[in-house]
């Protein structure tokens, strides 16, 4: 005989749902078997202390789901077609044996989700100061697009991005970066673009060349496509052309990933001569270059160098940019320009993965850009970050004057310094964490292990001047 437990008032679930759950559980565990008749609605009402309407609602749900049959004059019976005995066996076995371990195609590694709010001082390398984002302005853009929401835009079409946003981005790229491309693919951050490029170009076992000290999420995206990563040496001008030439002559390299404006993590700006050498080598070997221009806006010493994509007669440069530094990473807004066939392939892949980007966010950003508020925000933030860059320089020089043996080259732009602390920093992360300081040391960026790690990357954009100074004091106390 079916016996239930009393229904609870305080749960979030309606009583008829609780009752249906209990009957369903009783069938799944074999307490009620196919063909069994259920007590009458009146009896069930008494048993569970609910009225008849609640019982009927629960029964109708279970009939609709296929657990019960309703027969005239017979009442409700458990559906005879249910393979209950087999599923009872499986659930009993699952209780005594281990669950089946999934066999994945490859090991992706752990999910990293650092909480930036847990730190007192934040020197995370590319962190923008979100407190300075003009939320009121942006809310007005959001409000406008919601008020004028056009139903035809809210469906699945326009995989590559909303026309109004693409128009704004193409105009911006022409004006601010000298890029005269005629099409663009809007992505969920540049990370999605990296993943798509890996999928589009790499077959398992082929190689992607990267700076030996590089951007780990890019490496992971290429490895997800089955790529072997080949490290290329770097010097004070960025990636070394002779090391690249050697690598290209020895390996089946499909792609070269570069951050030429502000090398990640060393902050070096690659001079034009080196860019040309690298470009020529890639043309010779048929290798496509991914130019990740992640913080182009923030260059202080002079106007930023034009991207490599601005002079690309062989059409081998795939150019990426992001709004994660201009706005914040949670906006998940990035974009790619490349030759027509490359963009077509990436767009078709993007459609498979997630159809398109969030339409309202795209429209709001387009509205924000068209209003002129975007350019004003960029000017404000460039000025602010330039000041913070100076503050960090002054503080670091102060520590040198106090006798700390450290060395660094002041970056021409970007959001971080790369500082040689001239000592082994492999144990420093633990101490930094204990002191509430968020900063990354050299080992975080190396693909191949090294005998000695001595550098730290110190972001200056994400916190106010006082935080930079106090945080550096706390950090140097640890040394
Ligand atoms: C080298 C580099 N590329 C790209 C990005 C931005 O990635 P996304 O647009 O996926 O947020 C970052 C952010 O930290 C970065 O450091």
Image (spheres, rainbow, N blue to C red):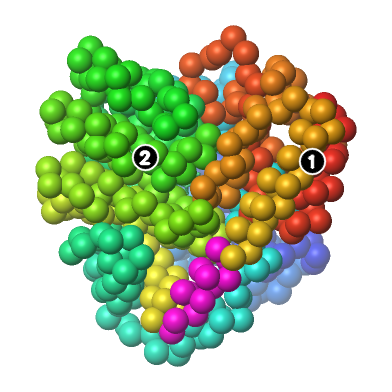
Task: Name the foreground residue: 354 vs 120.
Answer: 120
Horizontal and vertical percent position of residue 306 = 32, 53
Query: What label sits on residue 275 in the rendered view?
Result: none
Horizontal and vertical percent position of residue 391 = 72, 52
Cβ of mark 2 under 8 A from ligand 1: no
Horizontal and vertical percent position of residue 361 = 44, 71
Q: Residue furthest front?
A: 401
The residue singled out by tag 2 in the image is: 271
Task: Name the foreground residue: 382 vs 46.
Answer: 382
Q: Which residues are magenta?
A: 371-382
Residue 317 can be seen in this image: yes
Residue drawn at 18 percent across, 47 percent down? 312
Q: Is residue 220 left or right of residue 453?
A: left
Task: Name the foreground residue: 227 vs 174.
Answer: 174
Q: Quadrant of residue 133?
A: bottom right
Element carrying mark 1: helix
Element carrying mark 2: loop
Compared to residue 406, the image places residue 382 above or below, namely below
Q: Is residue 432 left or right of residue 113?
A: right
Q: Main secondary structure of the magenta part?
A: helix
Query: What label sits on residue 398 in the rendered view?
Result: 1
**What separation in Å lies between label 2 and label 1 (alpha carbons)?**
29 Å
Query: Is residue 375 inside the magenta stretch?
Result: yes
Query: Is residue 128 inside the magenta stretch?
Result: no
Compared to residue 59, the image places residue 278 above or below, namely above
């Amino acid at each position: 005989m079916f016996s239930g437990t009393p229904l609870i008032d305080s749960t979030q679930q309606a009583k008829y749902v609780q009752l249906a759950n209990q009957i369903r559980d009783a069938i799944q565990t074999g307490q009620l078997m196919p063909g069994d008749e259920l007590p009458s609605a009146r009896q069930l009402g008494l048993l569970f202390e609910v009225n008849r309407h609640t019982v009927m609602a629960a029964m109708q749900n279970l009939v609709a789901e296929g657990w019960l049959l309703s027969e005239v004059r017979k009442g409700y019976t458990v559906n005879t077609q249910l393979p209950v005995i087999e599923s009872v066996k499986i659930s009993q076995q699952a209780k005594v044996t281990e669950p089946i371990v999934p066999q994945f195609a490859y090991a992706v590694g752990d999910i990293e989700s650092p909480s930036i709010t847990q730190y007192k001082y934040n020197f995370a390398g590319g962190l923008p100061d979100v407190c300075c984002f003009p939320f009121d302005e942006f809310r007005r853009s959001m409000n406008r697009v919601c008020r004028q929401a056009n139903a035809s835009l809210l469906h699945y079409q326009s995989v590559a991005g909303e026309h109004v946003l693409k128009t704004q981005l193409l105009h911006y790229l022409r004006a601010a970066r000298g890029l005269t491309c005629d099409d663009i693919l809007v992505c969920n951050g540049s990370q999605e673009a990296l993943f798509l490029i890996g999928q589009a170009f790499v077959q398992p076992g082929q190689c992607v060349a990267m700076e030996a000290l590089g951007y780990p999420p890019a490496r992971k995206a290429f490895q997800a496509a089955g790529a072997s990563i080949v490290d290329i040496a770097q010097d004070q001008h960025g990636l070394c052309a002779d090391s690249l030439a050697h690598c290209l002559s020895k390996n089946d390299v499909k792609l070269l990933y570069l951050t030429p404006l502000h090398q990640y993590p060393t902050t070096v700006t690659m001079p034009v001569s080196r860019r040309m050498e690298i470009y020529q080598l890639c043309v010779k070997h048929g290798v496509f270059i991914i130019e990740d221009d992640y913080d182009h806006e923030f260059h202080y010493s002079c106007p930023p160098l034009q991207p490599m994509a601005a002079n690309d007669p062989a059409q081998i440069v795939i150019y990426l940019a992001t709004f994660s530094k201009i706005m914040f990473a949670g906006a998940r807004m990035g974009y790619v320009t490349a030759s027509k066939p490359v963009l077509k392939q990436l767009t078709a892949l993007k459609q498979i993965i997630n159809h398109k980007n969030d339409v309202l966010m795209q429209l709001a950003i387009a509205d924000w850009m068209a209003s002129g508020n975007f350019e004003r925000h960029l000017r404000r933030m460039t000025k602010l970050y330039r000041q913070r860059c100076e503050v960090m320089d002054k503080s670091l020089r102060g520590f040198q004057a106090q006798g700390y043996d450290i060395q660094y080259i002041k970056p021409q732009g970007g959001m971080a310094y790369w500082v040689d602390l001239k000592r082994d920093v492999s144990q420093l992360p633990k101490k930094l964490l204990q002191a509430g300081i968020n900063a990354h040391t050299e080992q975080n960026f190396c693909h191949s292990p090294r005998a000695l790690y001595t550098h730290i990357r110190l972001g200056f954009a994400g916190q106010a001047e006082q935080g930079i100074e106090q945080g550096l004091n706390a950090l140097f106390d640890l040394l």
